[in-house]
Image (cartoon, rainbow, N blue to C red):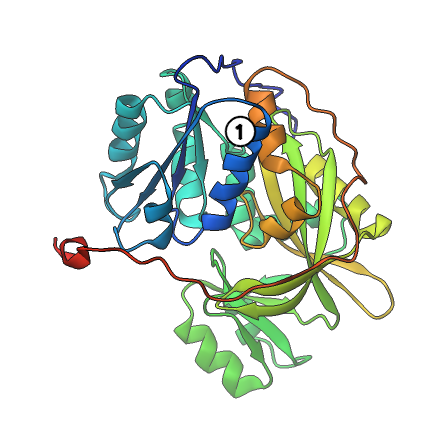
Amino acid sequence: MRSSGKSPRARKAGKEGLRVLFTCIGRRVELLRAFRRAAKTLAIRFEVHGADASRLSPALHQVDKAHVLPPISAGDYTEALFNLVRRMRIDLLIPLIDLELPLVAAMADRLAGIGCCALISSEAVVQTCRDKIATYRALKASGIDTPATWMWSEVARRKRHRFPYFLKPRAGSAAMANYVVMNRDELHTLGKRVRDAIVQEYVEGMEHTLDVYTGFDGKPRCVVPRRRLEVRSGEVSKGLIVKDPAIMAMGCRVAEMLGECRGVITVQCIVTPDRRIRVIEINPRFGGGVPLAIHAGADFPKWILSELLGKRPRINPTGFRDDIAMLRFDDSVFVPNASKLTKR
C-alpha cells in the first residue's frame, strides 16, 4: 500500500482553542488526561468532548462536554456522529474501538469538509487490519513473519492436524471468543460457536504490543514495545516497557507495509524462545495500554496536537524510558443524582 501523503490542514488555536472528540470513550480516562496534559504543555486552550452509547460510561464524566450517540450497530450512527461534529465544531476526532473504525474511515473526507480531522488510517488500511485473513495475506506478501492462518472451514475438513491451534473471529476484538484448541472435538465445537472463525498456527512465546506513532503522513517515527505481563478482559492490566531494537524495527516494517496510517497504530507480536518476532494482529487505533508508552516519554498526544497545529514535533525514536512497568487497579467515578442516567 502506498502512503496517501495527506496531512491535516493546520489549525489555529485561537481564543476558543482546540476541540477534540473521543468516540466510544468508555473507560479511557487515562488517555484523555494525557491529551489534557499535552495541551497544557503546548499552552493552548483545549475542550474535551466524549461520546458513547450510554451515560454510564465512566470517561463521559471526565470530559468537558458529554454526548450520547446511537449504538454503532444502529443505522443512524454515522449521521448522528457527523451532525455532532458539525454542531460542536470539533477539530479532531479520535475513534477508540475497532467496530467504529470502518465507519469513521469511510467518512473522513466528509468530516474534513466541515473542518474536522479524523485521526484514522485509510479505508484500505482499516479493512486490512479488521479482516484477519487479509492481515495475514498482507504480512505474508511483505515477507513479515506471521503465524499461518486459515478459515475454520478449511481446517475442519483436514484429516490430519497439528494441535494446538488458536481459534478466533475473523473480525474479532478485545480477545472476545478467542480459544486455544487442543483437539478435534474442540475444533469442531468452538468453530461452530464462533462467528466467521479463523484458525491460526499456535505460537509459544512472550506477547508484546507495539505502539507505533505514524503521525499524519504514515511514516513510523517511534515504536514503543510493551510486554504483556497480564491481561484482563482483553486489555493489558500489567505491562513492561522493553526497548528492544529488533522488535522496534518490526513495528516500523509493519507500518511501512500498510503505508496509509495516521496517528498511533497498535501491532501485536509474539517473541518466541528462539527470538522469532511473529506478528499476530494489527489495530489502527490507540491501544488500551498506551498510557504506559506515554508515561515512558513517547508523548503521542503532544505530537498529534503539534502536527494538527502545523508544527513538526521533535521526536527522538529511542527517547522513551526502558524497563518501566504499568500495574493497573480499579478506580471509581461517583455521580450524584444518577438515576436519570439509566432512563431511556
Q: In this rendered view, identify the residue nearer to me: 335 or 223.
A: 335
Identity, as a three-letter code, of the amino acid under mark 1: Ala
Numbered circles on residues, count: 1
Tell me the quadrant of the picture where the N terminus can be found: top right
The x and y percentages for residue 320 are 76, 43
Quadrant of the image occupied by residue 204: bottom right
Judged from the image, the secondary structure of the residue bearing numbered disc 1 is helix
Q: Disc 1 designates what residue?
A: 39
Instruction: Judge left or right: residue 239 versus residue 169.
Output: right
Q: In this rendered view, identify the residue nearer to me: 291 or 209.
A: 291
Determine the residue positioned at 60% across, 42% down: 265
Is residue 258 something one can see in this rendering?
no
Determine the residue positioned at 23% across, 42% down: 75
Is 89 located above or below residue 21 in the figure?
Answer: above
Q: In this rendered view, identify the residue nearer to me: 155 or 177.
A: 177
Instruction: Judge left or right: residue 50 versus residue 186.
Output: left
The x and y percentages for residue 247 are 79, 52
Determine the residue positioned at 55% across, 17% down: 309
Instruction: Judge left or right: residue 110 versus residue 9.
Output: left
Determine the residue positioned at 49% across, 14% down: 11
Instruction: Judge left or right: residue 90 versus residue 197.
Output: left
Is residue 236 something one can see in this rendering?
yes
Is 146 located above or below residue 67 in the figure?
Answer: below
Say few, some or many: other residues with alpha carbon within 10 Å of mark 1 (under 14 / 14 to 19 / 20 or more).
Answer: many
The x and y percentages for residue 148 are 68, 62
The x and y percentages for residue 141 are 72, 45
Q: In this rendered view, identify the residue nearer to me: 258 or 54.
A: 54
Quadrant of the image occupied by residue 138: top right
